[in-house]
Image: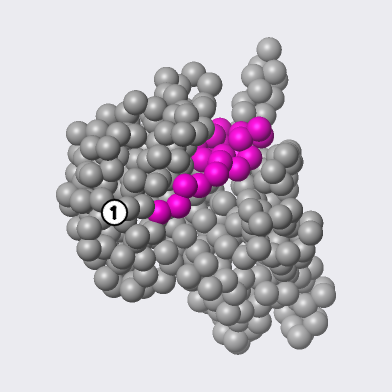
Amino acid sequence: MSKLNLIGLPKSELETRLQDLGEKRFHGRQLFKWLYSVRQYDFELMTDLSKELRDKLSDSFEISGLKAEDHKISVDGTEKFLFRLDDDKPIETVVIPSEEEDRRPSAGSGRNTACISSQSGCAVGCFFCATGTMGLLRDLTAGEIVGQLMFLRDKYGPSAFSNVVMMGMGEPLLNFENVINAIRIMTDEIGLNISPKKIVLSTSGITPKIKKLAEEKVGVRLALSLHAATQEKRQVIMPIAKTFKLDNLMKAVRQYADSSKLPVTFEYILFDGFNDTRQDIEDLSRLVRGLRCKINVIAYNRVPGLDFKRPSDDKINWFGRELNQKVKAVTVRQSRGRDIEAACGQLAARKFEKDRVSAQI
């Protein structure tokens, strides 16, 4: 019989598991610290646990992390890792260095952003996104979510990253329980010990789950993949907008901002000739009026087979300047990792797909 992998179990469940073994609950807390804070995966080296307990743990459990199948490095220092999970499903994780200079994890600066996945593939199916072309393969476990961060720290040390964004593969709010458990492990002081304010959860707009996220009080920052400021335009490029209407979605976003006391980020991908006009600027500024927020303007990154175009650099800069006249915090984001298909909207585990097709021939 296979052993239970401890990676991803909440602290409370570890305490219960230890109690079921006839041990004190506090040993579960010790084990939690060994796994995430110390990053020790050999029971025999958990020296504050008795030999008898270590033998019990070894008999009943295992500690199994992610292993990278592929690793690509962009000319701008962005790194992308492809992981093949135990059931052969693929996910990708991206590390984005600071723009100030070469701050790749190997440089040890720690001023990097880890972009992690919450699902293998995605069911939302935004018409501009490569991940959506995969469909949903499955939800990730909490262990597979935090495992991406543990892999990076194991590879590069404790300063591998300073910020985490759940903007990789998948819709985090459609894998709600596992994402919440993962966040609690990330933010626990004897877990990965990441400040909640350093974690951004990005959603395409699952209105009831945004409300539920506020109730959980995990304290992470919320980002909304907006991309169009009217219901009519948004549902053209994001099918999910037909279910979760923009007016109700914005009410939930405002409620989250009020309850968390944190600014909301709006991600706005520019598509040539679609959402890059002066009228779009007016609509966007009106939509966010009175809301403490920032807007990230991102030029569309081409995905083979999808019928969208990237605006010219002049158009992108014009849009950002004009929008900044109406909204205080506007950033025109530079696409990072485009040459290795690691930029916004490009994650689709293409190497995995090529390998799978080759194996079928």
Q: Image quadrant for the C terminus?
A: top right
Q: How is the image coloured?
A: one colour
Picture mark count: 1
On the image, the x and y values in percent for residue 227 come to 34, 40
On the image, the x and y values in percent for residue 153 come to 71, 62
Residue 82 sits above or below residue 181 on the image: above
Q: Locate residue 110 relative to residue 228 in the image: left or right.
A: right
Q: Which residue is drawn at 70% across and 20% down?
A: 359
On the image, the x and y values in percent for residue 46 come to 77, 77
- Is residue 251 within the magenta segment? no
Q: Is the magenta stretch mostly helix, strand or loop?
A: loop
Relative depth, front residue between 243 and 248: 248
Relative depth, front residue between 50 and 340: 340
Q: Which amino acid does label 1 sit on?
A: Lys
Of helix, strand and loop, which one carries label 1?
A: loop
On the image, the x and y values in percent for residue 293 come to 34, 61
Q: Locate residue 174 relative to residue 36 in the image: left or right.
A: left
Q: Which residue is drawn at 24% across and 33% down?
A: 233
Q: Locate residue 252 relative to residue 11 in the image: left or right.
A: left
Residue 160 image-quadrant placement:
bottom right
Q: Which residue is drawn at 77% across and 63% down?
A: 108
| Span highlighted in magenta in the image | 330-348
- Is residue 347 within the magenta segment? yes
Q: Which residue is drawn at 59% across and 74% down?
A: 193
Residue 241 sits above or below residue 350 on the image: below
Q: Residues within 10 Å of mark 1 (few under 14, many from 20)?
A: some
Question: Residue under circle 1?
Answer: 326
Q: Locate residue 10 relative to residue 211 in the image: left or right.
A: right
Relative depth, front residue between 206 and 129: 129
Residue 221 image-quadrant placement:
bottom left
Residue 199 sits above or below residue 347 on the image: below
